[in-house]
Image (cartoon, rainbow, N blue to C red):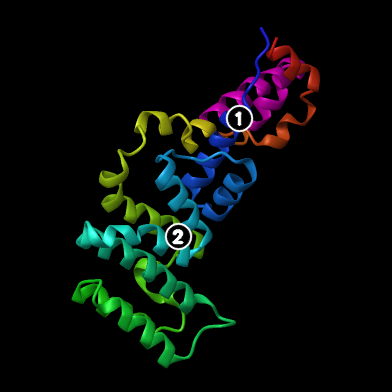
Amino acid sequence: MQVKLADKDVALLVMGYLQDRGWLSAMTAMEEESGFQMEDYGKELNFLRKLVLRGEWKNAEEFIRPLQSSVKEDYARVLFAVRKQQFLELLDDAESRPELPELVKVLKGLEELCSRSEFKELCFFLTLSDLREHGDYRSWTVSRGRYDTFQSMLKDLHPLYGSLPDPNSTRLHSGRRLQLLLERAVLHQASQVAGRNGEKLLDALAATGVTSIPLPVLHDVSPADFEADTM
């Protein structure tokens, strides 16, 4: 029997791994390049997600504007999420960071959209030379911030546009699943190496206390070995 993997399934497995590792700029770049998306939120939210991940803030605000007349509270929360990310990106732009008066003006526009504690936190960012000095933002990046922004927006938006993706379907493409598949493949190919080397190679590893098989050990696995495994 010959095994053939669909490009989409392979791409989703890799993107799931990137997502689990927090390599979100690589994940979003792969989404753009492949045309496949990790989760399906429906036509409207998929479009908004692309706007947010690309940082197209003007278009994102235009997309959510109709909510202003129907669900004002939800609209305020979603608009705050968008503008907060914009504000953080302005702070993080070392080359063209606006002067303090302009930043304060942007900050004032956020005040009526958030709670007092949220506004105080945003003000605190102005005192930092790098927003990663804030304990909750040590691993913050533009890509991670945009991804988290969309996830926070979903809490208010998904009841209006439809349900969230089935967790069982997204679990199939989780990073852990790819890791398990690769581990099993490596173990199987290691057995091919051991068979040709009379177990000497793996025995030598065990004698040194190695409990995992490094990929270079498999350097003498031939293309024929792989082809035989898929027939």
Horizontal side of residue 76 vs 144, given as left or right: left
Would you say residue 61 is visible in this rendering?
yes
Residue 198 falls within the magenta-colored stretch: yes
Q: Residues within 10 Å of mark 2 (few under 14, many from 20)?
A: many
Residue 169 at what x, y percent from top left? 41, 29
Horizontal side of residue 107 vs 3, given as left or right: left
Residue 226 at what x, y percent from top left? 73, 19
Amino acid type indicated by mark 2? Arg
Residue 46 at what x, y percent from top left? 45, 45
Amino acid type indicated by mark 1? Ala
The residue identified by callout 2 is 146
Give the secondary structure at mark 1: helix
Q: Is residue 126 above or below residue 230?
A: below
Q: Which residues are magenta?
A: 180-206
Split into 4 quadrants, where in the image is the C terminus? top right
Residue at 59 percent across and 31 percent down: it is: 8
Quadrant of residue 86 in the image? bottom left
Residue 125 at what x, y percent from top left? 37, 80
Measured Cα–Cα span from mark 1 to mark 2: 45 Å
The residue identified by callout 1 is 206
Residue at 54 percent across and 35 percent down: it is: 12
